[in-house]
Image: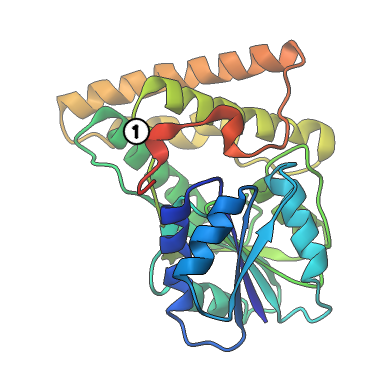
Amino acid sequence: MIDVIIASFKEPKSTLRAVEVFLKKKRKDLRVTVVDPFPEVEDFLKKKIKDKRFKFFLDPAEGKSYALNLLFQEYASNNKEDLFILTDGDVYVSDNALEDMVKAFQDKEVGCVTGRPMPLDPRGKKYGYWAHLFFTGIDRVRRELSENRQFFECSGYLFAIRKGVILDFPLETSEDSIIPYLFWKKGYKMKYVPKAEVYVKNPENWKDWLAQKVRNVKAHENLNKIAPDMPRTKSFINEIRWGALFALRYPHNFKEFWWTLEAFAARFYLYFKAFKELKKKRSYADGWRGEATTDSTKTLD
């Protein structure tokens, strides 16, 4: 059984598109569940989708990780050939993503598989350029670590795990970091499948960009408390080590080079802001995107 879980937050049109990409597949072993805290989203989707493989889970609005834990237990299976595929309602995957990710699990040592985020934003605008720069850098690092069978954190936009390995995970950090770590501790490997693409609309203004990135940094810094022995792939030091020289070589012209310098300054500031908030005990808390809404990332709604 393949359970696709799509976490959404009051984005019915975008979520409908995300669901339909999966339901185009004729697999009988497929179930697609949308988890959302808004009843009106359930009403909208059930009017549009008549496929019996579609389910809706109205969560108690306690956070994405909390809802995922509930579904992990409800859809639990002792069969490690069964899979969870996790994605979001404000993104959508390539037509081949499902098959390519499932195929990766033919290696019995693989416990987590992640796809490749692709920006929908135009490279010709600053925030779109930043998205292309950062996503290309992440792609480069994941390819290297995957080929060397080393640990790396997955992409919350699209990743898959075997059922029957874990039933829950801590809520105090991002699921795309802690879940791969829990599998790693049990002896499983990570695999990156760049052909399994997931299309992402990124922030297009400073307020939204900073809110999104600060929240991400705070989530990852909580790992120091939860999993101090976890190999870190997303950190300030690793950004410099793996990304600084690459970023300087990435621009095609002077405008992009200037945007790259601005990106350096922005990354320094966001880490400063995140660490400052953590020092004031304003820590990461599991919650839906409504906690720090980034309206410019919405595509259809």
What residue do we see at 75% from left, 36% from top?
223
Q: Amino acid at mark 1?
A: Trp
Q: Is residue 154 visible?
A: no
**Vertical placement of residue 286 versus 16, above or below:** above
**Vertical placement of residue 214 versus 120, above or below:** above
Q: Nearer the viewer, residue 29 or 46?
A: 46
Q: Residue furthest left?
A: 253
**Vertical placement of residue 231 versus 58, above or below:** above
**Vertical placement of residue 227 versus 168, above or below:** above
Q: Which residue, given by chain and number where applicable, does mark 1 sit on?
A: 130
Whether residue 179 sits left or right of residue 94 in the image: it is: right
Q: Nearer the viewer, residue 153 or 76?
A: 76
Whether residue 279 sits left or right of residue 238 in the image: it is: right
Q: The residue tagged with tag 1: helix, strand or loop?
A: helix
Corner quadrant of residue 126: top left
What residue do we see at 50% from left, 54% from top?
89
Q: Is residue 174 visible?
A: yes
Q: Nearer the viewer, residue 161 or 253?
A: 161
Q: Residue 142: x percent and y percent? A: 51, 53
Where the N terminus falls, by quadrant?
A: bottom right
Whether residue 190 sits left or right of residue 200 in the image: it is: right
Total numbered badges shown on the rendered structure: 1
Asked which colour scheme the image uses, the reply is rainbow
Corner quadrant of residue 229: top right
Q: Residue 132: x percent and y percent? A: 33, 42
Whether residue 126 sits left or right of residue 66 in the image: it is: left
Q: Residue 66: x percent and y percent? A: 76, 48
Mark 1 Cα shell of 10 Å, populated few (<14), some (14-19), many (≥20) = many
